[in-house]
Amino acid sequence: MTTPDHALRRDSFYGRRKGHNLRAGQAETLADVLARLSIDVSAPAPAALPSLFKAPVGEVVLEIGFGGGEHLVHRATTEPAVGRIGVEPFVNGMAKAASAIDAGGLANVRLFDRDAAELLDWLPPASLAAIDLLYPDPWPKFRHWKRRFVSEKNLTRFARVLRPGGLFRFASDIESYVEWTLLHVRDHAEFTWTARDADDWRKPWAGWPGTRYEQKAFREGRQGSYLTFQRR
C-alpha cells in the first residue's frame, strides 16, 4: 500500500515520491505486484526471514533505493536461491521494477515503498546476509547532508539486522559522499572496510550489471566507487 505524500516523515532520506503519471497498464501492474509482494510492517516480523518468499531461499539481501530495479532484478534472476527485499519510495522507479518482476515471474523478491528506516526497525536481528546501498541520493548541499542515508543511526540499524560477517555494500560517484561514508564507517565500532588495494573500490563487484544512475555518472565524467564493509 502506498502512503500519501502528506503522511511521510519530514526527515525521510529520499526526495520526491512521484514523477510523470503512470500509464494505465503500468499502474495496474504496480498495484497488482505491490498487493502480492509488499511487506506489511504493521504485522510481526517472521522469526525466519526466508519464509517471506514463495521461492525457497537460503539467505536474504536488502537493497535500499533500487531506482528502476536494474540491479535488483538482475540479481534476483541470476541468484534464485537468494531472497531480495527491494526498497524504493519513488513511484515511477517502483513501477518500472514491478513490470520487470512480473514479466520474469520472480518469486524471490519482496518490496517496500516507504522509508527504509521503517523496514530496518522491523526486521529481525541478524537476519540479513547483505545490505546494498547503490548510488543513493547524495544530497550535495551542506544543509541537506543530515538527510544522507549513511549516518551513525542507520549504521547501527544495519549492524542490528546484519548477521556477523554480513556485508554492507555502497556505491557512489560523488566523492564527498564516498568520503562521508568512509569516515562514518571508520567511526562505527561494528564495521570493517574490506579493501586490500585500490581495485577493491575502483571496480564493481562480480556480476555487477550497472545501473542507469551509473551510466549517467559516466556520461558526465564521474567514476564510481564500490565500497564493501563487513559486520564484525
Image (cartoon, rainbow, N blue to C red):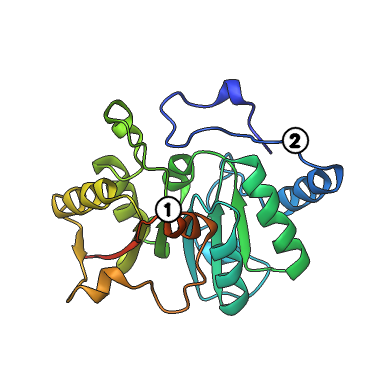
Using the image, determine if residue 204 lies above or below residue 187: below
CB under 8 Å between callouts 2 and 1? no
Q: Position of residue 156 (x, y in %)?
A: 27, 47
Q: Residues within 10 Å of mark 2 (few under 14, many from 20)?
A: few
Tell me the quadrant of the picture where the N terminus can be found: top right
Q: Position of residue 92 (x, y in %)?
A: 66, 43
Q: Is residue 176 visible?
A: yes
Q: Secondary structure at mark 2?
A: loop
Q: Quadrant of residue 137?
A: top left
Q: Is residue 80 visible?
A: no
Q: Position of residue 188 (x, y in %)?
A: 17, 51
Q: Quadrant of residue 212?
A: bottom right
Using the image, determine if residue 207 lies above or below residue 112: below
Q: Residue at x 42, y 63 (%)?
A: 128
Residue at the far top in the pictured view: 6
Q: Quadrant of residue 106?
A: bottom right
Give the residue number, with chain letter if any, for mark 2.
21
Q: Amino acid at mark 2?
A: Asn
Q: How many marks?
A: 2
Q: Amino acid at mark 1?
A: Glu
Q: Residue at x 62, y 48 (%)?
A: 93
Q: Secondary structure at mark 1?
A: loop
Q: Nearer the viewer, residue 43 or 28?
A: 28
Q: Position of residue 186 (x, y in %)?
A: 15, 54
N-term-proximal mark, 2 vs 1: 2
91 sits to left or right of 139: right
58 sits to left or right of 224: right
Give the residue number, with chain letter if any, for mark 1.
220
Which one is in front in this view, the residue at disc 2 or the one at disc 1? Answer: 1
